[in-house]
Amino acid sequence: MIDSGFETKSVRMELLLLVTFQAPASDVDRIMEAVVAIAPLTMGKYDSNAYQSAHGIERYRALDGAAAGAETELRRRPGTVEVSFELPDDQALAARIVEAIFQVHSYQEPVIRIQPILASRSKGLDDRSNPNRWWNTTGDWKKAATIKEDA
């Protein structure tokens, strides 16, 4: 079991909580606004850090007691994504985040998971000359990302 972090020359590996939830893509902005209102999801010199998967298909069948009522057919909901982000190892904070997700989620039974992980945090060394960094390889990534989104 992971119980402590460690360091390398460039990175600290810290014990954090990985929070993951599944939702329709159309719910994600609303859910993340609620999350970031509680925890800024800071990583170094960046905030609002999270990962969102590509669209997938969720499968389920409503049983007795479900808000939609019991169904016999299996449902397949396209456009569902998985979002993950990291929090400090703080159970009270995690509880607030889970409650916030639940309150703004469109599902009766949201899928929310929390796992302890070791996650990297840069020590912030000056590596401007590192030939592998994006600013030394691909140029203006902001402009390239905007062009792809507009296409």
Image (cartoon, rainbow, N blue to C red):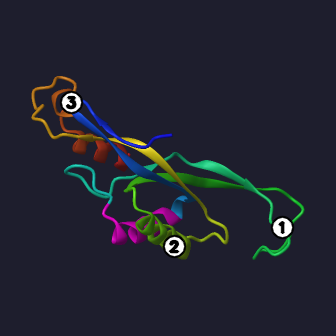
Q: Nearer the viewer, mark 2 or mark 3?
A: 2
Q: CA distance from mark 2 to mark 3?
A: 38 Å
* Residue kind at label 3, given as amino acid type: Arg
Asked if the residue at tag 3 contacts the one at tag 2, i.e. Cβ–Cβ closer than 8 Å, the answer is: no
Left-right relation of 55 to 12: right
In the picture of the structure, the residue carrying the numbered disc 3 is 133
Q: Element at badge 2?
A: helix
Q: Quadrant of residue 69?
A: bottom right
In the picture of the structure, the residue carrying the numbered disc 2 is 99
Q: Quadrant of residue 112?
A: bottom right
Image quadrant where one finds the C terminus: top left
Crowding near pointer 3: few (<14 within 10 Å), some, many (20+)? few
Q: Element at badge 1?
A: loop
Which one is nearer the viewer's eye here, 92 or 145?
92
* Residue kind at label 2, given as amino acid type: Glu
- Residue 62, position as x, y percentages in the image: 80, 66
